[in-house]
Image (cartoon, rainbow, N blue to C red):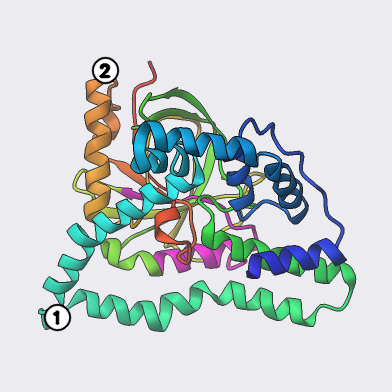
Amino acid sequence: MQSFALHFVLFLYCPFTIAFLPPLTNWREKIDVILNPRTSFEERRIVTIDLVNDIPSISKDVSESIRNNGVQGFINDLVLAPGTEARQSYEGIKVVNRQLREDIIPEIVSDLSDENSKIKESLLKLVTNDLPKSFDGFTDKTKSAEKSKSKSEICQNFEMLREESLNIVSRTPEGLYTPKYEVKYAQKDSEYEIRSYGKVAFVSTALKNGESSSGDAFNTLAKYLFGGNAEKIAMEMTTPVSMEMDANSKFNQMSFILPENVNAESAPSPITNDIVIKEVSSQFVAVREFTGFATSKEVQKQLEELKYWLLAEGWSIDEKEQDSYQLLQYNPPYTLPWLRRNEVLVKIKDE
């Protein structure tokens, strides 16, 4: 509802550009466009009108599907058709359900019986520190919007608020720089893909106490990126956040990607020895995407799956990187778990 309201205000008051929709070949694609929270008010209106004209075709397809395949077949083939937003959300919810049953809840139950419970400590830190900081940016933008006086300021701040609210239901945040890559090979069942990245610059800091210090590491890097550097230069946030890990999925370093126009030489100087600027000339990597919570157990599971498929299909892991892997996380912490985009990455030999 908030997303619709923001769209409507922008539609009435602010200048906007209607994006050209890609050709929509069937009514299922049109429903996907309508349900996509990033579809503009005007685009949704146009597609909805067009969809009404498809009612006879929809009725025919539904009747034939139920007659030939039963209700379950109708659900699988039409309601949850492969490649649709509905199917992706359904599969994501199944993954989160498995993670809760097999990983998260058993760990919580086991840990809460321990007097020195790490989960109790983590929950306290989450409530008193991490969550308030996560929403600081959103609150600042809300206050900025309230103080805006000019038409251009109002439009700009409404757009920022709209983007923040849409990130709750977005697999990959828009408006943030992400390094470009070329897909060299995509496994037919989407088990993994091979990518080639060009030159990328990072700002990194050590995870002194492993995964438990990830919140502090994130804040250290964010402070540097947003102006806490020698030159006091504020830069834009980027995605994904990278966490390096060893063969046992023990995290030891966190990195932010520097903005597109910033390299290792031009990057502002850190004001603390905890931060390191580095640049990678190129990378040839295998990547496996997964959704839900990126717990240590889940990351290990996904990493083993990736290594299994690489071995099965004849790819060789770079010998220099045998014990070094990466977890890439694209979303803010308030994105719905079943929509989150996580990836495990392994460097392989360029063949």
Q: Is residue 165 visible?
A: yes
Q: Is residue 196 magenta?
A: no
Which circle's residue, 2 or 1, is located before the other in the chain?
1
Residue at image coords 69%, 31%? 23
The kind of secondary structure element at disc 2 is loop
Looking at the rendered image, the disc whose residue lies closer to the viewer, 2 or 1, is 2
- Secondary structure at badge 1 equals loop
Give 272 or 201, whichever is nearer the viewer. 201
Q: How many marks?
A: 2
Q: Quick one: label 1, few (<14), some, or many (20+) residues within 10 Å? A: few
Q: Which residue is mark 1?
A: 116
Asked where in the image residue 68 lies, by quadrant, the reply is top left
Q: Quadrant of residue 111?
A: bottom left
C-alpha separation, residue under disc 2 versus residue under disc 1? 46 Å
- Which residue corresponds to the image point at 64% horizontal and 70% vertical from the top-left? 2
Q: Is residue 209 above or below residue 93?
A: below
Front in this rendered view, residue 155 or 46: 46
Residues shaded magenta? 216-244
Image coords of residue 203 (percent x, y): 49, 53
Q: Inspect this view and state whether residue 270 appears.
A: no
Q: Position of residue 87 (x, y in %)?
A: 43, 44
